[in-house]
Image: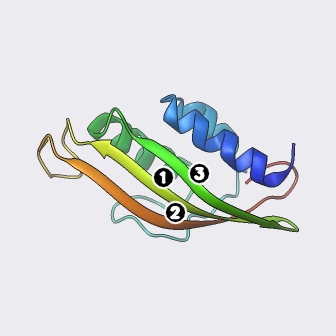
Amino acid sequence: MDNAGQLQRMFELVNKGDVNGFIDNLSDDFVEQEATPGLPPTKEGTRQLFEAFMAAFPDLRFHAEDMIASGDKVVARIRVTGTQKGDFFGLPASGKSIDVQGIDIVRFGDGLA
């Protein structure tokens, strides 16, 4: 599977609520470049972040709108949607929907992100 296909597969795992499957694709020395207060920028911190997202937004979905792959990197323009049905880092459930656009830049090596 090429790197863009691998990243799409990782998004699909999140969309199915399979946080562990998603995390299993990260290398043990993974570093999250987008800091989340109170969480380490590691594989375990990323697990905690996604578990918090899934608890607060049980219908969380990652939609890759564009992907560009070059060498060991994939850039994805993504849209993240969901409905807040649980607390999220101190914010009580609102029942409101989110629709957020973002850019993910992922480097793959040894078959892992």
Dot 2: element: loop
Residue 51 spot, x, y in % from top left: 41, 39
* Distance between mark 2 and mark 1 Cα atoms: 6 Å
* Residue 9, image x, y percentages: 68, 39
Instruction: Find the distance from the CA under tag 1 to the CA under tag 3.
Output: 6 Å
Using the rendered image of the protein, determine whether residue 26 is visible from the camera's viewpoint: no
Report the residue at 52% width, 63% height from top.
41
Q: Are marks 1 and 3 in contact (CB under 8 Å)?
A: yes
Please state which amino acid type lies under the numbered disc 2. Answer: Pro
Using the rendered image of the protein, determine whether residue 108 is visible from the camera's viewpoint: yes
Q: Dot 3: what SS?
A: helix
Distance from the alpha carbon under mark 3 to that under mark 2: 7 Å
Residue 22 on image: x %, y %:
61, 39
Residue located at (16% from left, 46% from top): 96
Count numbered badges in the picture: 3
41 vs 70, nearest the viewer:
70
| Horizontal side, residue 27 vs residue 91: left or right | right
Circle 1: element type? helix
Q: What amino acid is at disc 1?
A: Gly
Res. 86 image quadrant = top left
Residue wearing tag 3: 43
Quadrant position of the C terminus in the picture: bottom right
Residues at marks 2 and 1 touching, judged by CB atoms closer than 8 Å: yes
* Up-down relation of residue 33 to residue 112 (above or below): below
Q: Which residue is mark 2?
A: 41
Give left or right: position of 42 versus 30: left
| Mark sitting on residue 100 | none
Image quarter hosting the N terminus: top right
Which kind of residue does numbered mark 3 sit on?
Lys
Q: Position of residue 69 (x, y in %)?
A: 79, 64
Q: Quadrant of residue 66?
A: bottom right
**Residue on which disc 1 sits:** 45
